[in-house]
Amino acid sequence: MNNLRKLILLLLLILTMLFFFPIKILQVYIFDEGERFNEVIYQVPAHVNDDVSVLWTHSVSRRPIVETYTINDQLKFDIKEMQFDTYSANLPSQPENDTKWEFHDEYIRVYNYDVEFEEIPIVIGKVIANHILQYNDKEVVLKDVYRPGGYVKVRIIKESLISYLKEGVF
């Protein structure tokens, strides 16, 4: 009888963890209007203070850009830094506010931003940009999980483990 009680307690503990223990999840979801609006197309467990990068090719300069964000304890994204190797449209051209600039042989690094995003918006490049989401040494080519030209957002949510497993998008 004692073993049966232990088994029941263990099962209750497992069920409690599955249904009530929240985990942090990084999700990419569709933000285009239409029937797929808000559909999660990629998700993975996430942790506060982890970095998330978006790699892409600038459509004018045709040069690589890397934007890196840090997940903060409010489950938002702080801009950590941006790296590029030439000036171009819609890229920083000089220090603003308290940003710092480092000039390296291969690239320019801009950091010390004081900017926070609830979500990271991305319009997936149709021809040149080839947006790639990089998190924990894994890269996701966004045009492979949703259509080129599509509008997606990256967010961090808390969800029960069972909901995460049920969603099944990896």
Image (cartoon, helix red, strand yellow):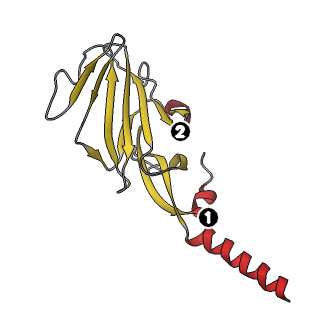
Mark yes or no: residue 5 visible: yes
Residue in the image at 24% along x and 37% along y: 113
The residue indicated by pointer 2 is 136
Residue in the image at 43% along x and 39% along y: 52
Location of residue 6 by image quarter: bottom right
Residue in the image at 55% along x and 68% along y: 21
Q: 37 or 156: which is nearer to us? A: 156
Q: Position of residue 154 (x, y in %)?
A: 42, 44
Q: 33 or 71: which is nearer to us? A: 71
For the residue labelled by badge 1, is the local secondary structure a helix, a strand or a loop? helix
Q: Position of residue 8 (x, y in %)?
A: 76, 81
Left or right: 76 as drawn, with respect to 16: left
Query: In the figure, 160 relative to 47: above or below?
Result: below
Left or right: 18 as drawn, with respect to 141: right
Q: 124 or 36: which is nearer to us? A: 124
Q: CA distance from mark 2 to mark 1?
A: 22 Å
- Mark identifier at residue 162: 1
For the residue labelled by badge 2, is the local secondary structure a helix, a strand or a loop? loop
Q: 140 or 138: which is nearer to us? A: 138
Which of the image's four quarters has the N terminus?
Answer: bottom right
Q: Amino acid at mark 1?
A: Ile
Q: Position of residue 81 (x, y in %)?
A: 32, 32
Location of residue 124 by image quarter: top left
Location of residue 42 by image quarter: top right
- Mark identifier at residue 81: none
Tag nearer the camera, 2 or 1 = 2
Query: In the figure, 151 relative to 46: above or below?
Result: above
